[in-house]
Image: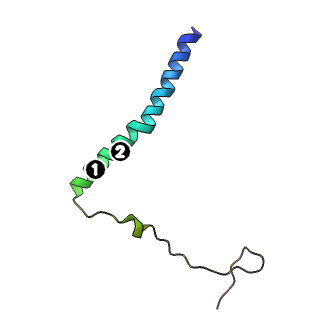
Amino acid sequence: MNKGLAWVIIGGLTSSLFLTLIIVPVVYSIFDSILRRMKGGEKIDYATEMKADYKHRELSEDGYTPKHLD
């Protein structure tokens, strides 16, 4: 009885592994390409979208708080 249960558990773990690592990304990619074709819009330039508006500030002597620059 325990040997059969072990096969069921191993099979379930293996099938869920393939489902999450292979099947879901492939289906997502297919739907994404279909939606992109239906939109017909321009491609998004992710390099320009991901740029942060970062302003460098000097730290005070404690090393944690920024200096107040006037």
* Above or below, 40 relative to 11: below
Image location of residue 6, percent across then percent down: 56, 16
Q: Which residue is mark 2?
A: 28
> Residue at the spot x=59%, y=11% of the render?
2
> With 56 as the anchor, is 23 left or right in this view?
left
Locate residue 40: give its quadrant: bottom left
Dot 2: element: helix
- Work out which residue is located at the far right of the displayed protein and give it: 62
Q: Which residue is mark 1?
A: 33
Residue type highlighted by circle 1:
Ser
Residue type highlighted by circle 2:
Tyr
Quarter containing the C terminus = bottom right
> Residue at the spot x=56%, y=11% of the render?
3
Mark 2 or mark 1: whose residue is earlier in sequence: 2
Image location of residue 69, percent across then percent down: 65, 88
Q: Which mark is residue 62?
A: none
> With 12 as the anchor, is 22 left or right in this view?
left
The Cα atoms of the two marked residues, 2 and 1, are separated by 9 Å
> With 25 as the anchor, is 54 left or right in this view?
right
Dot 1: element: helix
